[in-house]
Image (spheres, grey):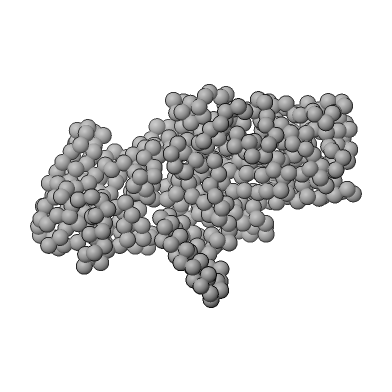
Amino acid sequence: MKKRDFLKYLGASSVALPHFLNGFNVKARSSSLFGKAFRPYLTDTDKVLVLVQLNGGNDGLNTVIPLDQFENYFNARENIYIREDKVLPLNGSDHLGLHTRMTGMQQLFNEGKLAVVQNVGYPHPNFSHFRGTDIWQTGADHDEFLNTGWIGRYLKYEYPNYPFDFPNPDMLHPLAIEIGYAQSLTMQGPFFNMGIAIADPTSFYDLVEGADTPLPDTPAGDQVEYVRLIARQSNHYADYIKAAYDNVSFQPQYPDTSLAAQLKIVARLIAGGLQTRVFQVNMGGFDTHDFQVDLDAHWLGHHGDLLEELSEGIKAFMDDLEYHGIGDRVVGMTYSEFGRRILANGSFGTDHGAAAPVFVFGNSVQGGVVGDNPIIPVVATANDNIPMQHDFRSIYTSLMRDWFCVPESGLGEIMLRDFPTLPLIGASDCVATATRSRRQNAGKKLIGNYPNPFTDSTNITFASSGGKAVVQVLNTQGQLVATPFSGAASVGEQTVTWDAGALPAGVYYCRLQNGGTNQVGAMMKVR
């Protein structure tokens, strides 16, 4: 019997069943008996990466100010420069400082939780917003066009069977979440997008609170409500996102800004137990061609407002993680499609440029400054750019290797070529564990039975990697009713017959535990 027909058969039977997706109950919350029975076998994601995209091209020279070249900096930017007495000092780094409005990130740096990577870019920079964004999100060379994102390739490496038979007991939750109306190239895998999008903070809170923006009592309103209903039913992960949200009852205060609202969602989902590996949030407005500063006080104005929103949002996010005791599990980084030119323009702004600083933040970050201050010519021209010192893909490679513990053999597959690494993560705890094995097997059918449905007995087949294996049968209340196999198993497919003649008709779950791998399949006993 085909799987689709089997599910159709279950839906038509007289037995009261939970809603199934890929053989697993997507309605199982932590409060249910079923959820409690299986919780010990679910491994929380130990490490999370949060990407903060700064859309528009952030002006790095007014973000991280080179104090050791202040005269040249002043000469190039007399109409927008940040006064030396307004630059925020950084412990142990007297040759540079942060923009006046970045007090939150100054504190993180001084606590050793923020790394400043100087002069990040790539050879032959492209000054188009669209092409520059594509390059940063895919990890491509300037003349190379890729249709996969660097995070999409990483997630495909970790979860090679996605999206078939996902969610599953080894990965119940979205692999990646992006706050935005559509998935960016960052999350695009070789065949499928590896994440989901949450449109905006308002729609997210509507989702978790079961609320919707009021609709007019018109035929058009009825049609929109129908679309909403279908969308809710189609979101396989909605229940898990809601459950993670509901697990957190308090969060420290955040600023009232768009970025902070997005980061607040991310912190709550991580603290609530969502196993999602990567989150991306977005902040726009960095295309500062004109009136970048207040003409009477350059540390004020549009760019200063943006940097304050960035700094205070990240600081509130870090405080939230610390409050919930999960600060050691999260690392974040900022990125923008390019920097700005050295010379300010005549409109009190800056034009598209090349390299710029990148921030990497988190308790596990090796804080400090990576790289040298950019070299600023005595007399800058309109075409002068900050030369690249660090390839942005070196940051990606370093995070893959030292944060996500990707072995050297996998880095080339993800990054498509070799890049030198940077000292961004503190003492690495990357060791060989069973976690990767579970991720690699997630979505792969390791246990099943035939016939299914069955009347009295069925053959349970399971794939063994060798060693100790246990096959158990549980009912819908999560109670153990049989152990058809327990012992040493050879490598390969094994079969054991289970006689269920004395048990009532209904749904049962066969569970395999083999080394660090656990998987569950649904079975149907009929009269």
Who's the residue at 75% across and 51% down the image? 305
Q: Looking at the image, which residue is at 26% across and 56% down?
A: 7
Q: Considering only vertical position in the picture, is 365 above or below 5?
A: above
The answer to whether 3 appears left or right of 282 in the picture is: left
User: What is the quadrant of the C terminus in the image?
Assistant: bottom left
The front one of 432 and 136 is: 136
Is residue 395 among what the camera can see? Answer: no
The extreme bottom residue here reads: 217
Q: Quick check: 378 left or right of 144?
A: right
Q: In this view, does 298 lie above or below 453?
A: above
Quarter holding residue 456: bottom left
Percent across and percent down for residue 467 are 23, 34
Q: Which residue is drawn at 14% across and 43% down?
A: 496
Q: Position of residue 167 (x, y in %)?
A: 37, 50
The front one of 11 and 414 is 11
Residue 157 at x, y percent in the picture? 43, 35
Q: Can residue 143 be seen in this view?
A: yes
**Residue placed most toward the observer, 98 or 261:** 261
